[in-house]
Image (spheres, coloured by chain):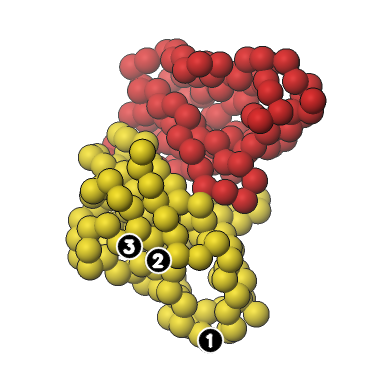
Amino acid sequence: DVKVTQSSRYLVKRTGEKVFLECVQDMDHENMFWYRQDPGLGLRLIYFSYDVKMKEKGDIPEGYSVSREKKERFSLILESASTNQTSMYLCASSTGFISYNEQFFGPGTRLTVL
Amino acid sequence: SQQGEEDPQALSIQEGENATMNCSYKTSINNLQWYRQNSGRGLVHLILIRSNEREKHSGRLRVTLDTSKKSSSLLITASRAADTASYFCATDAGYSTLTFGKGTMLLVSP
């Protein structure tokens, strides 16, 4: 079974802090994704990557950056956390053509920025 | 980017009843996927239906796709309390990323 793990289930940070969210998948998937999920807004794509060192902006990249140095790991970085980045963050991975195949999700990280 | 919209936003039924939720989208797609999310957890893929398919089954799940109406439905037969979750449709438009709807919250009472 595909396993996608995220470094923390719950995280509390202060405004202005630099925050790292880590995601690791164990099925050699080419594609990895970061979403945020907010009540009433559903899932929104922040960034995705289709190969090592490659990254593409999603629908809401502002205030975020990503890093993919190894195929299995995709990191989301909040350079200077703000309260409006309080949210549930979901990582996912997939193989092949992005839109043709299912995505496998991690359990999520609930981030609170105070 | 286009977006699927689920309907209803919330659905409450008794165990043993069938649950039907719908998804509408705006532009042509290659495929449509349904996912389930248990409270506070990640999403789990349920089923994928391609644009040239009209119906697909997986266990107690039945998905239909009507490309002329740009809509899909997910039917869960003989619902169980464990089916309580949010259900999302996700659509694509070519070699692009998936766009998720806002979901239908299903509550199945014992």
Q: CA distance from mark 3 to mark 1?
A: 22 Å
Q: SS at mark 3?
A: strand
Counting from the top left corner in percent of width and height, residue B70 is at 48, 25
Q: Chain of mark 1?
A: A
Q: Quadrant of the C terminus of chain A?
A: bottom right
Residue B27 visible somewhere in the drawing: yes
Which of the chains bears the disc numbered 3? A
Going from N to C along the chain, the mark reached first, 3 or 2, is 2
Q: Specify the chain shown as red.
A: B
| Label 2: which secondary element | strand
> On screen, A36 above or below B12?
below
**Horizontal arrangement in the rendering, residue B100 relative to residue B110 (left or right):** left
Image mark 2: chain: A
Three-letter amino acid code at the position of disc 1 = Gly
* Residue type at numbered disc 2: Glu
Considering every residue shown, the one lying at the far bottom of the view is A16
The colour applied to the residues of chain A in this rendering is yellow
> Which numbered tag is attached to residue A16?
1
Tell me which numbered mark, 2 or 1, is placed earlier along the sequence: 1
Q: Are marks 3 and 1 on the same chain?
A: yes
Quickly name the residue at label 3.
A74
Give the Cα separation between the discs numbered 2 and 1.
Answer: 19 Å
- Classed neighbour count for the residue bearing mark 1: other residues with Cα under 10 Å, few (<14), some (14–19), many (≥20): some
Name which residue lies at 47% across and 77% down: A19
Q: Name which quarter of the figure residue A13 lies in.
A: bottom right
Q: Nearer the viewer, mark 2 or mark 1?
A: 2
Vertical position of residue B14 compared to residue B35: above or below: above
Against A32, is A8 above or below?
below
- Cβ–Cβ under 8 Å for marks 2 and 1: no
